[in-house]
Each structure stands twice: as structure tokens, then as C-alpha cells.
Amino acid sequence: PSSPPTIPHLPVRYEPLISLEHVNINAGGTWTEQLSRFWFSVMGGADDPRGAVVCSQVQAAGGPMQGLHWANFGLQQFHLPVGEPEDSVQVVRGEVGLAYTTEELAALQRRLEDASATHAVGADGSLRIT
């Protein structure tokens, strides 16, 4: 018997998501290097290759999905489908909050600045990424 696939995750001392499991966010019509850099380098997610398997299954069933990337943060995941209809239900209508230590938040802000990612610093020191 084969063993189950290993779930890629980051060796972090904390979990930036308290409890979400996963959330789907449409990634648009094309996966770009900019998206890859944002989710995996700037935000620090781990690239989970199992999304490609799920995408193949959706395509085999006739779904319009052109690609699927999973960004793991500890045991939490962002599912980022590519090529889904713009009016799809997979759009977050609100905010997702991530919890970071003070040091990790400062490092994230530096990565956002280095990537010229649009963000704002709140009066309480929080970061808002738009």
C-alpha cells in the first residue's frame, strides 16, 4: 500500500491563520509570475502540488477551470482557481485576517514593499493588502 501524499507546509513557530481550513479565491483568467511571487514569496505560502491533480479531475468532468494553485499556510489553504467565471461564487466578499508575530509582520511588510504590493499600515500597526 502506498502512503498518503505529504502536505507541504512551512516550518513556522505560529500559524498565521487561526482556523479557516481553506478558502477559494478566483485568480483570474491566467496564472502569472506576479501571482506566484505574491502568494509564495511575498505572503510566504507553500506551493501545494495537489491542486494540479484536482484541476485535472475538474477538467475531466467538463469544468471550465484552466488551472488551480493551492497556497498553504500551516494547515490552512488558499485555493486559487484559474479560468473560473468572473461571477463565480468563489469570490471572498469581505476580509480574511492573518495573525503574525510582531517580527513576522515587520518582515511581511518589507516583502510587500520590496514587491511594490499595494498595502496600508493601520493605526494599530496592522497591514491591509488590497
Image (spheres, rainbow, N blue to C red):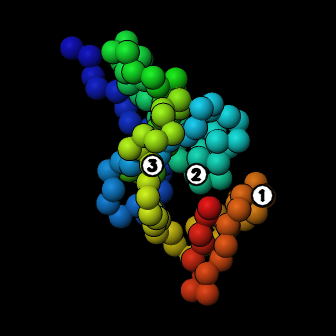
Q: Amino acid at mark 1?
A: Ser
Q: Earlier in the sequence, mark 1 or mark 3?
A: 3
Callout 2: few (<14), some (14-19), or many (20+) C-alpha neighbours within 10 Å? Answer: some
Residue at mark 2 = 44
Quick check: can you spot residue 49?
no
Q: Is residue 19 left or right of residue 26?
A: left
Residue at mark 1 = 116
Residue 97 lies in quadrant: bottom left
Cα–Cα span, label 1 and label 2: 16 Å
Q: Earlier in the sequence, mark 1 or mark 2?
A: 2
Callout 3: few (<14), some (14-19), or many (20+) C-alpha neighbours within 10 Å? Answer: few
Q: Is residue 120 left or right of residue 58?
A: right
Q: Earlier in the sequence, mark 2 or mark 3?
A: 2
Disc number at residue 88? none
Q: Nearer the viewer, mark 1 or mark 3?
A: 3
Q: Which residue is most to the left?
A: 1
Quick check: can you spot residue 84?
yes
Q: Position of residue 95 (x, y in %)?
A: 46, 64
Q: Secondary structure at mark 2?
A: loop
Q: Is residue 99 left or right of residue 119?
A: left
Q: Amino acid at mark 3?
A: Val
Residue at mark 3 = 91
Cα–Cα span, label 1 and label 3: 24 Å
Q: Residue at the location (53% across, 48% down)?
A: 45
